[in-house]
Amino acid sequence: MPALYREKIVSAFRDNAIKSVLLIDDHYLPYQGIGQSYINTKNELGELISAPAEEQETIEQLKLKLTAIRNIVNRSSSELMSSETAGQFVDFFHTKKLICDVENQTNNLDIDKIRKSDLIVLDYHLKAATEHNPAEHSLNLISELSRSKHMNVVVVFTAEDLKDVWREIAATLRGAHIGNVDAFFNNDERLIDSWNDFYGDWNNEWDQFYNANIEAEYLKAELNIEVTTNEFQVICEGNGYEKPEAEHVKWLLEKSVIKFNKNSKPLSNVDVHGKKNLWLQAGAVFIVLCEKERPAGEDRVLRDTTPEEVWGQIERALVDWYPSFQGDRMSVYILTT
């Protein structure tokens, strides 16, 4: 890519387009929250330490008390570290003369408020990791933003494997068939009967045939179904199995990606584009994936990702996207506002 065009992309989609930033993280505490957290921690520790000991306090009881103290300290430390990190991001964006706000009330996000922010730095797990579907709130938010009239750049900030995060976001934006095999085949008895007769053989071969590239192409609606069907038919026929039809292969594909559709979104009419582990674009939202920690030094010890590195990740994603300045809804929107 010519350097001039690269600069034009970054300028149009990041430097000149982003005027406001919103950080969304349930662990962030504003200054008054930090003070309250300190008071709560002090009170909880005081209650544990000052509690009258039983005459015959067992080792197990002492272990439980020490565990409780450790959990309180760890929680308080985590809250403080998250707040410090958020503070670094706020300072960074302020040096770039950008409006920056922080949202930590994540159970009931105000979509209209969020839409007005050009850049959203989003913690992927807005629910505790121990809860079911901890990414539920963030996935719902991304889905909503894809249907917005306002262009949003979303940096998904995560400690999870970027490969899994990419698949979950892509599957949420695309949606999936919600229903059984009969409905998928439109109650076509011939297709249903052959599926019921041979799906065991096909499933076994599919596990060997299916790969990450097929998965990504299917999620982006870029997979050539005819070619994929022909290739899979050759494998099945070579092993003495009945050849599946294209609709059977589509159902195998659907079954393979539906597990990533964590919020059970139905099929959408939004086109999903992207590069694995780096970015996704759907409707009016451009999503950049960024890990919370990165290896540093010769020993590759993990350290926190800096705001400067997040800003650079946006540039890398935009350049890789290589948007057109004509005919693309997002490009036209940014360049005309």
Image: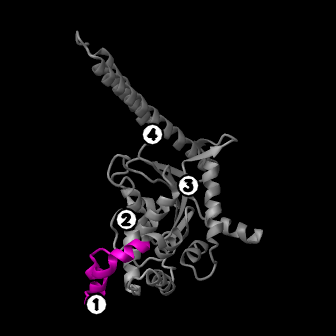
Q: Secondary structure at mark 3?
A: strand
Residue range highlighted in magenta:
177-206
Q: Residue at x 66, y 40 (%)?
A: 299
Sequence-first tag of 1 and 2: 1
Return the residue at label 2. 259
Specify the amino acid type for callout 1: Arg
**Which mark is on residue 290?**
3
| Labels 1 and 4: the sequence-earlier one | 4
**Looking at the image, is mark 3 or mark 4 earlier in the sequence?**
4
Tell me the SS state at disc 2: helix
Q: Return the residue at label 1.
A: 190
* Whole-percent x, y for residue 336 in the image: 59, 75
Viewer-side residue, 97 vs 11: 11
* Type of the residue with mark 4: Pro
Whether 299 is drawn above or below 13: the answer is above
Q: Which mark is residue 30?
A: 4
C-alpha span from label 3 to label 4: 24 Å
Mark 4, other Cα within 10 Å: few <14 / some 14–19 / many ≥20: some
Q: Is residue 320 left or right of residue 273?
A: right
- 46 or 178: nearer the eye? 178
> Would you say 324 lies left or right of 232 here?
right
Amino acid on which the number 3 mark rests in the picture: Cys
